[in-house]
Image: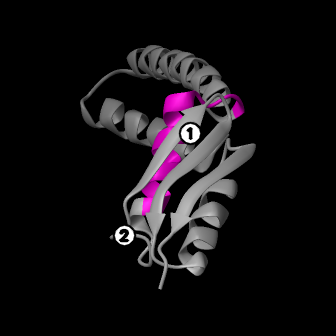
Amino acid sequence: MSYSRRNRLCCLAVLVFASGCTKTDADVLAGIGRKLLDRANVATGSVEQNWTKTPSRFVIDLRVKNRLRWDKALADVAIEVQTTETAVELKGTVPTEELARRAMDLAESTAGVEKVVNSLRVQGP
C-alpha cells in the first residue's frame, strides 16, 4: 500500500473516530473508503496507461510547442510545429544554425516523437 493511500485511510479513520461513530460504523465507512479508492485507482490507472503508451497527435504537438516556447534561446523565434501521428515537422526561419539544431534536439527528445522533419530556414548573414 502506498504512502498516500495509508495517509488517506488514516485521515478517514481519525475523522470517523473523532465524530463519535461506533466501531461498526467506522469499519463500514473504512470499507466504503477502500472500495472508492480502489475504483478510482482502476479508473485513473487505465487512463494513465493509455496516456503514456500512445499519446495523441494533439498531445505530441502541445509537448513540442511548449518545449520550444519555454527554451530561453528559442523563446522569441517563431517556429511552426505540424504533427502527423508521431512525426513532427518544424517550419520557420531561425537566426542561426545553432538555434535550428537546438529546436531539432528539443523536438527529437520529446516523449512520443519518433521522427522529426527539419523544414527550418536559417537567415543569411
Q: Residue at x 31, y 35 (%)?
A: 15
Q: CA distance from mark 1 to mark 2?
A: 19 Å
Magenta residues, dominant SS class: helix
- Residue 97 point in image, percent of width and height: 59, 77
- What range of the chain is rendered magenta? 53-68
Q: Residues within 10 Å of mark 1 (few under 14, many from 20)?
A: many
Q: Residue at x 58, y 23 (%)?
A: 47
- Residue 52 point in image, percent of width and height: 65, 35
Report the disc number at residue 60.
1
The amino acid at mark 2 is Ala
Visible residue check, residue 62: yes
User: Of circles 1 and 2, which is in front?
Assistant: 2
In the displayed structure, 44 sits above or below 117; it is: above
Quadrant the N terminus occupies: top right
To which quarter of the image does residue 14 belong?
top left
Q: Nearer the viewer, residue 13 or 91?
A: 91
Report the disc number at residue 101.
none
Label 1 SS: helix
- Residue 91 point in image, percent of width and height: 50, 51
Q: Which residue is mark 2?
A: 75
To which quarter of the image does residue 12 belong?
top left
Q: Tell which circle, 1 or 2, labels the residue nearer the N-terminal end.
A: 1
Left or right side of 36 for 97: right
The amino acid at mark 1 is Ile
- Residue 10 point in image, percent of width and height: 46, 41
